[in-house]
Each structure stands twice: as structure tokens, then as C-alpha cells.
Amino acid sequence: MATPYLAGVAALLLESRVPAGQIRSLLQTTASGIPSAHEANALPASLAHQGAGIINVGAAIKAVTSVSPAELLLNDTTNWERE
């Protein structure tokens, strides 16, 4: 069910005059983190488990800044140099 939800979010952002090329980075920049457990003081889940986090549509529409490029390489073996 994530795909229809994300399509609706993208439509809302396009309606609010966000350029199509900035939607991905805007959603990743304004996403909310996910805790690793259902406890009050739980640490955040790892990036491998949560990705950018939970989409926050209101924050994305009201955002004035965005991080670009919206990319995090967790397995960058192409550029890794052995010491």
C-alpha cells in the first residue's frame, strides 16, 4: 500500500508548486525517524531498516530547505580503498 500513498503525496506536492525533480529529496529531508522499539526512550532504527523514515506530508509542503543529493550509499564498495 505504500505506492498509492506515495503517489498521492507526490500529487499534493505538485499541487503546492514543488518542482517534480525535488520531490524525492524533499520527502527524504522532512521524513520522521522510526524508533527501534515501542518504548519511550528507544534508539532510532538503523538506516538499513528504516530508510529515510516515515513520510511527513505537512513538513514537506511547509519546508523551505532541502538536502541534495538525496542519496546515502550504505555499500559503497566501488570507491572503497583497502588500507
Image (cartoon, rainbow, N blue to C red):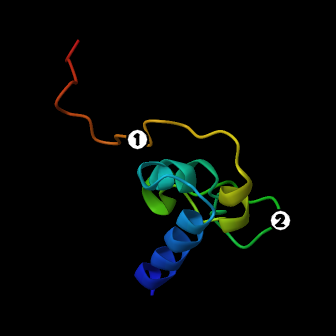
Mark toward the start of the polypeptide (2 vs 1): 2
* Rendered location of residue 32, percent (x, y): 67, 59
Residue 52, percent from left and from top:
52, 55
- Answer whether residue 32 is visible to the viewer in this image: no
Task: Report which residue position mark 1 lands on.
Answer: 72
The secondary element bearing badge 2 is classed as loop
Of residues 68 and 43, the one nearer the viewer is: 68
CB within 8 Å, label 2 to label 1: no
Visible residue check, residue 83: yes
For this orientation, the residue located farthest to the top is: 83
Distance between mark 2 and mark 1 Cα atoms: 28 Å
x and y, in percent, of residue 48 in the image: 43, 55
**Crowd tier of the residue under label 1, counting other residues whose Cα lies within 10 Å: few below 14, some 14–19, many 20 or above:** few
| Nearest to the observer: residue 21 or residue 58 | 21
Q: Which residue is drawn at 67% across and 63% down?
A: 35
Left or right: 41 as drawn, with respect to 68 = right
Q: Residue at x 55, y 56 (%)?
A: 27
Residue at the farthest bottom position: 1
Left or right: residue 83 versus residue 71 is left
Amino acid tagged 2? Ala
Decide if residue 25 is on the left or right side of residue 34: left
Residue 28 location, x and y as percent?
53, 52
Q: Quadrant of residue 45?
A: bottom right
